Amino acid sequence: MRILEREIEQVVLGSGAAGFQAALRLRQYGEKDVALVTEHVKAGTSRNTGSDKQTYYKLSLAGGDLDSVGTMAKDLFAGQCVDGDLALCEAALSARCFFALTELGVPFPYTEQGEFMGYKTDHDRGRRATSAGPYTSRLMTECLERAAKEKEILILDQLLAVKILKADGKVKGLLCLNKEAKDEAEYILIWCKNLILATGGPAGMYHDSVYPLSQTGSSGIAFEAGVKGKNLTEWQFGLASMSPRWNVSGTYMQVLPTFVSTDADGGDEREFLLEYFQDKAEMQSMIFLKGYQWPFDVNKIFGGSSIIDLLVYRETVLRGRRVYLDFTRNPGTEILYEKLLPEAYAYLSQAEACFGTPIERLRKMNEPAINFYKDHEVDLWNQRLEVAVCAQHNNGGLATDEWWETNIRGIFAVGEVCGSHGVTRPGGTALNAGQVGALRAAECIHIRNQQERKAQEENLQAEQGEQKEQGEEKAKERETLLKTAKDFVHQADEAKGEQSVGEMWLKASKRMSAFGGMIRNKENMQESLHNVQEELEHFYERMARPNAAQLPAFYKLRDMLISQKVYLTAMLDYCVQGGGSRGSALYTDEKGKLPAGKLPELYRCCTDDGKHKDVIQELLLEEGGSLSVQWRAVRPIPEVDYFFEKQWEKYRKRFL
């Protein structure tokens, strides 16, 4: 084992759309000492996920749609548990970030006159959504990567971050495992002044997941470094195909496929939605609404489309069956177009799709959605598509201020790893938030560096003795931190158990999906938290000693278990505080309501009474391993004085 050292002032961790944008913005601001560090430059969620037409949410930019920064900020803020300053930033910078992407070559469609038209997405009151097709985030990432390479930004690939080093409340370094070293473990300790985390959500926690297998997240090392978590209870769950992992939202639902279940071996076929819906037109309307009400939402259970998610969950989890979408036949034999909900009938009519089978309607409305599966060797013209209710996006994450900086000075969080979203959010806001957060973090770093460089220039006459003393203190600090890094990596050599990473990962991820996923029960969460705490406490005793090639999975497992501990603590605390079902999480309640029809008692719940909508839960993992939980009021939308001369003066002080 060996540890190599190097010094890079600004480090961006992660190679998705947010990570590349952060690195690019730093360079555009004139910061030269910048590097992007990644486990695998072609991995991650941005490059490997999408949907029928993956959505980017932005300010309305077409026609007579009435919109404003203030209106968009209020709509984001209305998602509950959202800090108003972040909402205002995401609204104010949405057009700037969107146009930056179009100028880099992301092919967002526009009219012949140059207007970027939009459509309505989930939790959206207007038509702010746009799309470059199924691969929007991939196209964004590729264009941003190309621009970063043109700017000759250093990219350090095949480095897995395993520990963040800090001192005096400031980031000092990032310890990474070199995945290319197979014979002997090799680590790179990067001494840095600023660290932008763009590592995505902790997707590895869940077994039932639409995240790509390459996306596991690194939230554990952030929690371990003392970064606060925020709104960790809030996830999005929704219907997704299992192979390939892909959201079946939007057009996949609006063309009205048939839901079929079988036993584990493929026999005993049933069109199981008919067990619940007595009215075929109502069933078909609810399937349609799943298109833009795609995330499971407890407020849409009773008489809404989220009953579809519960029926699928019943088949797959409670009954142990398999569920498929069949695009070759209509649900309930025939489509009763004129009896559908008015919005469903109007949409299909306007799309000229009131005919034929689901696959024929899909070809008419969105043929690229068919081609995606064809590219992954699934022929929807002849094959069924296996689906389940899966974890899709973490609305919570790491807590930051309005510059996307965490409670540790110099550590920023951008993209999904940042908890800027609340309980519900309009579809596509995640892509906008990642771009805005990257810009804000880079701007903050640049302004701060500029101020420090100016102060240094003014202090050139400082006594040589002072400079020598500061240098000695820095060397001593690094010596202490280097010892911390060495002690940490030596722990892997002390592993003496027999359990494999694969066995532990499967057990832990299935447990999280069952008890910390869409359906949550207090007793089950308590038991799960106890189990994960025990696994962490005895981690090195139970796990088999890894060789150099096994170390990446070994460290990822540890990171995942730390994340599970923090997230389960958050969920349990919310439950103990009297929180009810909200967003994509159904908390069971013996006294609650049960949806009509023959459904299990497990679904008995009450929606949240609203007392938690204006407060935010934050968690801090202490050095000894204990967790502290605090609740605070949301930060309101700032009241800005828009008098031009005043703001111009403030701007000049920041940049000139």
Image (tube, helix red, strand yellow):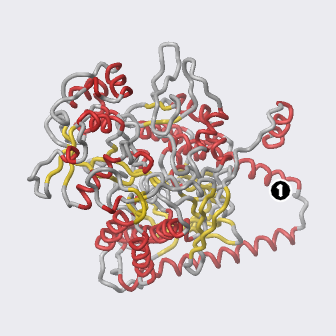
- 23 or 272, which lies in front? 272
Q: Does residue 388 appear in this view?
A: yes
Residue under the point 30% across and 68% down: 506
Residue under the point 78% across and 41% down: 655
Q: Does residue 526 appear left or right of residue 70 in this picture?
A: left
- 343 or 629, which lies in front? 343
Q: Does residue 301 appear left or right of residue 380 in this picture?
A: right
Q: Secondary structure at mark 1?
A: helix
Instruction: Kindly identify the amino acid type of the residue bearing the numbered disc 1.
Output: Gln
Q: Does residue 44 appear in this view?
A: no
Instruction: Where is residue 396? Give x, y as percent.
Output: 53, 56
Where is 34 relative to 527, above or below? above
* The N terminus: image quadrant: bottom left
Residue under the point 57% across and 72% down: 621
Instruction: Where is residue 509? Give x, y as percent.
Output: 35, 66
Instruction: Where is residue 373? Give x, y as percent.
Output: 25, 39
Residue under the point 36% across and 48% down: 238
Farthest residue, direction top: 113
Farthest residue, direction left: 267
* The C terminus: image quadrant: top right
Where is 164 relative to 321, above or below? below
Which residue is under mark 1?
A: 456
Which image quarter: residue 638?
A: top right
Q: Does residue 419 appear left or right of residue 443 in this picture?
A: left
Instruction: Where is residue 284? Give x, y as percent.
Output: 27, 35
Mark 1 burial class by Cα count in 10 Å: few <14, some 14-19, many 20+: few
